[in-house]
Image (cartoon, grey):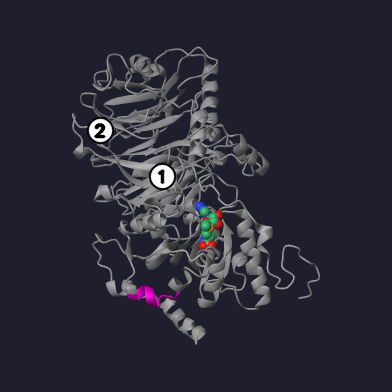
Amino acid sequence: MDEEVAAETRKDTEVAPALIAVHPDRHSAVVAVGPELRAFDLLTISAVSLLDDSVSGEQPSHKDNIRAIRFGAKGKLFVSAGDDKTLKIWSTQSWQCVSTVSSEKRVTAVAISNDGLHVCFADKFGLVWVVDLNQTSKDKKPTPTPLLSHYCSIITSLEFSPDNRFIISADRDFKIRVTNFPKNLLNGAHEIQSFCLGHTEFVSCLAFVPAQESPHSLLLSGSGDSTVRLWDISSGALLDTCEVAIKAGLLESNGNAEEHDHAVTDLCSTLDGLLVAVAIQSLRGIVLLSCDVSTKTLSFAKVVSIAGETFIPTCLANCSPTKELWMVTGVSSLPGYDYPSLARVLVISGIDVEEEPVVLEDDKIPGGEKLLETLQGTTSVDDNAFLAAAEAVKAAMCNLLIKKHYPFENREYRKKTRNDKKLKE
Amino acid sequence: MPDNKVNPTHSKSTGLPRKRFYRARAHSNPLSDSHFPVPLTPAHVDYSLHYPQADSSKKIKFADIGCGFGGLLISLSTLFPETLMIGMELRDKVSEYVKERILSLRVANPGQYQNISVVRTNSMKYIPNHFEKAQLSKMFFLFPDPHFKEKNHRRRVISPFLLDEYAYVLEVGGIIYTITDVEELGEWMKSCLENHPLFEPLTEKELEVDPAVKLLSSATEEGQKVARNDGQTFQAVFRRIARSDQSVVQDVKHVRFVTSDSFGSIYDYSILQS
Ligand SMILES: C[S@@+](CC[C@H](N)C(=O)[O-])C[C@H]1O[C@@H](n2cnc3c(N)ncnc32)[C@H](O)[C@@H]1O
């Protein structure tokens, strides 16, 4: 085990942000907070009980913080993974766990190919693994195959290109790598198509702009440098940069970006690719950008603020058929408060260039109170707790992804006194 | 140039920097985060700083990874005078030494050594920041640190995953040169290259006519040390090939022949020899 990464792994990842995912046809919505998965069926308006034969009785499926959840493009599959070094693949029909995959290290990101045949996940050591879903069956535990590696970096996001030709991986070293997804998985993915370079801080999130007519898919990325960038993945060319924090009025254009107060934490695009919703670490609401696929530009559209409460989204999920944006804020645990974990769900409707976005009141949310009870756990939480939660999530993210710039003497001292060096290997 | 300031770190007789003033720790951990500037993209590499007299349209074609004290660069500089090349070195003091060494050579030999430079960086992390896709025609890995322990194999500068990045920055037909005096490491580097779908070994004949091959065991400080001790060396020299399962069939002939660049230099080399 490598000392440097291991030392960081232990102390910096104690809290995890709450996550949300919505079924592509809006059959269900899932929130992950800490080790807990909470699913709600929007067709029957009822809580879903997850069935997992690999754990006994009332045990949760995950034994540590969940770091990544997502639905497959067709909605048949759902995956969850995290710090417990397991990846769970669920059928969304039965909500049964159809396979449990073991990882050697903690899992930081997952992706499902658009044909639903492959699941990729990234581990804490920068390795990306692939699971061939054809090879999985209930009685056989699937073994993942290593695909590629970001040398000693943390992979923050994984995404398949819409045509499944490429797997895109983003890391904390400002890098986005575009790799040809191989036909023969056992040999690994050796052919790098491009690197998308230009971010000046960790890359936190990726999303594709679904462009039906355009032969080349455009990729969006958000970063700790408070920008959203648009890329041509076949060449790695940077097409446009939107300084979202400045545009949203959070930062002066000469502002001190080093504070990392305005890191972009998540983004998603609408099905027509015209609008992009962006979450920023200090913004009580979201920023909407408009994306012009023909001119390959991004421009600031508006800020949608959330009035009346402290809601800084930790994760976004787009629901295209109903033009809704689902958001969650929360944290796995909050030292100093009575809540074991926190999650608050909000929905913005009218995410469309022709409509006016509206933040829905709790009783107008699809699934209503029942949904909120299921996904949020506790119903009413003191507003200060959410502010503290946002701070805790921010601190954890900065610790994890921003490199510490120790002065030289300090570094030498750190090396000499490092505990893990003293321990016998 | 009237230079009456005596630089105590440089030899009085040769004006070259003296190695003992640039002594450094024997090994660096390539996994730890370091604090040197990294170009944001290859377009941000400051060529005017590295090669002030070179034609500004030229790009770096050769990279010496873990260049140590720079012996290879200095030999290659006159062998391929038209080619820009760079050494990458993790240790600060060592890269400073190489920089001084090149600057002194430029002063002592006006018009020469303008095509070589050095950068302090961790090549295992920042290769894509320095070179574009298919930019390089040669990469050298001479006497890299062995990292014997199994758990440290991922620190080796040749590994299956890192070869993906080297394949990315090498042009099709470009050549990767490796040599070591550690048999186990030699086996490792060779098997990594053999098992990689984007590399194939050079034939005996090709190795014979390649002037760079002759430098592998003799040009660097490490190589000379091994030679003095009559040590054995193990080399693996492979060519970047196009992907075999690609539908577009590559012009095999073009790939097989030495590139025109090294061809011209073979000519230079024979002049030097005669
Ligand atoms: C044994 S020395 C060989 C030097 C030189 N090639 C020679 O043959 O004399 C290996 C060199 O690689 C450097 N090195 C090790 N890891 C490196 C990395 N990740 N990036 C750049 N240089 C590295 C070391 O600092 C050291 O100078």
Range covered by the magenta-colored residues: B205-211
Q: Nearer the viewer, residue B140 or A292?
A: B140
How far separated are the C-alphas under marks 2 and 1?
43 Å
Three-letter amino acid code at disc 1?
Answer: Glu
Q: Which residue is mark 1?
A: B150
Tell me residue A169's x, y (percent).
39, 45
* Circle 1 Cα neighbour tier, 10 Å, few/some/many (<14 / 14–19 / ≥20): few
Tell me residue B97's x, y (percent).
64, 61
The answer to if B206 sits in the magenta stretch is: yes
In the structure shown, which secondary structural element does the residue marked by tag 1 occupy?
A: helix
Q: Disc 1 sits on a residue from what chain? A: B
Residue A366 picture quarter: top left
Q: Is A54 above or below relative to B106?
A: above
Three-letter amino acid code at disc 2?
Answer: Gly
Q: Which residue is mark 2?
A: A75
Magenta-colored segment: predominant secondary structure = helix
The answer to if A214 sits in the magenta stretch is: no
The residue furthest right is B4
Task: Kindly indicate whether the residue at mark 1 contacts the one at mark 2 (C-beta within 8 angstroms).
Answer: no
